[in-house]
Each structure stands twice: as C-alpha cells, then as structure tokens.
Image (tube, helix red, strand yellow):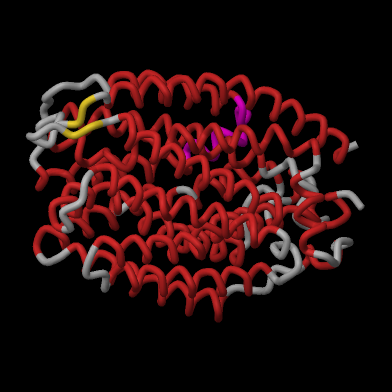
Amino acid sequence: MTEQTVAAPIDAPRESQQGFTRYQSLLIALLAFTQFTIILDFVIMSPLGAILMPALNITPAQFGVAVSAYAFSAGISGILAAGFADRFDRKRLLLFFYVGFTLGTLLCAVAPNYHVLLLGRIVTGVFGGVIGSIVLAITTDLFALHLRGRVMGFVQTAFAASQVLGVPAGLYLANHWSWHICFVAIVGISIIAIIVIAFAMQPVDGHLKLQHDSNPFRHLIATVGERRYTLAFGVTTLLATGGYMLMPFGSAYTVHNLGIDITHLPTIYLVSGLFSIVTGPMVGRASDRFGKYPMFVFGSIVSIIMVLIYTHLGPSTLLTVIVVNVLMFVGIFSRMIPSQALISAIPDASQRGAFSAVSASLQQLSGGLGSVLAAAIIAEQADGTLIRFDWLGYIVIATAIVSVVAMYFVQKAVARRTGTLVA
C-alpha cells in the first residue's frame, strides 16, 4: 500500500491544500508548545552551567556527563520504544512519555546534589527523548510533504521561544533565587501542556490500519534493516554529533573566554531567540518554495563560517557576541528545518513511528557522545577559561561538510520516492 492511498486528504494535490485548517493550526501550536518544554529542559542546562558547576562543586567533565546522561538515556529508550511506536495511537504515546518527562524534571527540581541531579537527567531523558520522534511522526502523518517545511519551521520556533522566553527567565530565576526554580517552572508549564493535549488533540491512529508486524521486535528489526533508511540514519547522526559539542559549554565559554558578565547572558539568549522566532517560519517557507536541499546547503555554509568565527573569538563586546550568536542560529535553523522535512519523506507510512524513534535515538546517542568527547577535549584553567575550544569548532565544521554531501544523496532518494508516488 502506498503512502498516497494511506493519507489521501493529507497528500492531496498542491492546489487543494495550500494552507492549514483551524484544527491543523491548533495542532501545530500545540506541538510547538510541547517541543518548547522539551527543548527548554535540555537547553537550560547549558546557560546554567556557569551556575551549576560552582553551586554543586563539579568539574566541566562531570557537567558534560550530566548533559550527556540525558542524551544517552534518551537514545536507549528510543530504541526500546521503536518497536511499539507504530502499534498505538500517537496521542496516547505522547501523553504517556510527556507525563514521565514531567516527573523526571520534577526530580531535577528537588535534587540536593550532583548525583540526584544526574539521576533526574537520566529519567528525563528516558521519557523526553522519545517525544521529539512522536511529534515528528504526527507531523509526517498529518501534513503533506509540500507543507512540511512550513510546519517544521513553526514547530522548530519552539527552540527559539525557549531562547527568548525560557532561558532568560530561567537565568533570571537562577540568579535571583535558585537554579532549582528553573526546573520547577518547566514542571508547571508541562502540566498545562498535558491537560491541553488530553482534551484538545484528536487521536492519531490512521497508521494502525497498515500494521503487518505483530511482534514489536520484528517491527524494529524490519525498520533498522531497511536499506533505504541507512543513509538517513547516518545523516541524522552526523548532524547531532556536531550540534551537541558546542552547546553544553556555551555559557562558560561566553563568560570566561569572551569576557561577558554572567548577568548579560539572558540578553544574548533573548536577542538570539527573537531573531530565531522570525527566522524559523521564513526558513520553512523558503524550504518549500526554493527546495529543501538548497536551504540546507545555505545553512551549512553560514554555520561553518560562524562556528569558525565563534570558536576563535577573544574578549569581545556584548554587541559582537550577540551578532555572532544571531548569525550562528540562522545557520542552525537553515540546516535543521529543511533536513527534518526531507528526511521525513523517507520512511513508509507503516514505519514512521519506528523510523522517527530510531532516528531520535541515533541523534541522542551521537549527541551524548559528542558532549562526552567535547568534555574530554577541552579543559578549564584556574581562572575558569576553557582551552582547546577551537578544536571543537574544527570537528563541527568537518561534520557539516560531510553532511552536505550525504544530504545530497538523501534528497535524490526523496525525489525518486515522491516522483513514484505522484506518478
């Protein structure tokens, strides 16, 4: 059974579905809000690094382990969940993992020491790491390929919103009260999201009519063993490895190497996030209009240039650091949105959940490996300055170059597949 017969209303001709229905708009907003809480829980660790390390008396290597613990646990749970990802209503799956994520974040909020915090990150990763793949599967189920760039653009503004609203607010709370309050706030807004999902979201169960593998293990093996998916899995791994290397130590690098006062960190994240909120939807529309691969190449070029500049900056003014961060986020979004939209067209409808779960697992595991590798490469001097940070930049640039080549073959595979479906 082809993808076209599975979702005729979704894969309708371009002329008949240019915009979004009212429910689709509500769903996009809901998925974006869900992603906002998940992403905020992860990205808040980076700016809190400059506060957490002295507060808990931990080293950069230990902090790197705390960051990567989320990624590794998320990667393992994603693999375990992949066999079941297409066997249940995606709404119910989303609720189940979201509740577990909220409980893990609550454990972080009450953590009195490093070891309890580490446990909280593991629990949060086990549940939170799967949610992104569920959101991606829902998006792919309910929106045609020619609309997915726009959808991904809106959903990924959650990352920007976490920069604009979450990170500055979190840093403000941490600076004026305690870092524990940051996680308490995430728990509060997550509970609101759970209630909205439960009552406003319709079931997403059309894929259940297509299931042929009654055994979850066989379903997982069939998905992992599908040769058409290998390249897409490889590209996902490359993209995550580079991205996770710079993020965990961004705040410490900004404060100690670039000479920016810690009280100005919220300003940097605020301005960068505001620009990203505007950039995300624009990149999504451009991806649908001009092509997803050209946008990915553009984003890769911008990212390479800005990473090279960022990792070689010395003591700088606040304005310089803001401009560099803004341009770097433009490059990140111009890679992330089109790559997700392209890769979403690779799996069969009956394997979307498993494919997304495996992809998310690879992303988390490779990202965790990147964090550990970054922690092993850099070192902290007596004054807090990080050395060998530029080495991380070279690794990120290398992965970006390889991913451009690999993504070229992904887009050719998508063109052949969508061409067949249209025919």
* Residue depicted at 57% across the width and 25% down the height: 403
**Of 423 and 167, the residue lying toward us:** 167
Taking depth in this image into account, of 268 and 104 the one nearest to the observer is 104
Which picture quadrant has residue 20? bottom right
For the C terminus, which image quadrant? top right
What residue sits 75% from the left and 55% below the top? Answer: 220
- Does the segment drawn in magenta span residue 212? no
Reply above or below: 248 against 319: below
Secondary structure, magenta segment, majority class: helix
Q: Residue at x 32, y 43 (%)?
A: 248
Comparing 416 with 401, the one in front is: 401
Q: Is residue 258 rendered to the left or right of residue 202?
A: left
Give the tally of numbered discs: 0
* Residue 240 in sight from this viewpoint: yes
Q: Looking at this view, is 384 or 7 the one in front?
A: 384
Relative side of 184 to 416, left or right: left
Q: Could you say where residue 281 lies in the image, as x and y percent from the top left?
A: 48, 43
Residue 100: x and y, percent? Answer: 48, 72
The percent position of residue 322, horizontal first and vertical second, equals 21, 33
**Residue 80 in the image: x percent, y percent?**
64, 60
Q: Up-down: is 238 above or below 115?
A: above
**In this rendering, position of residue 88 left or right of residue 76:** right
61 relative to 55 in the view: left or right: right
The quarter of the picture where residue 268 lies is top left
- Does 286 lie within the magenta span? yes
Magenta residues span 282-293
Which of the 4 quarters of the picture holds residue 173? Answer: bottom left
Q: Residue at x 74, y 39 (%)?
A: 229
Residue 318: tell me if it is visible: no
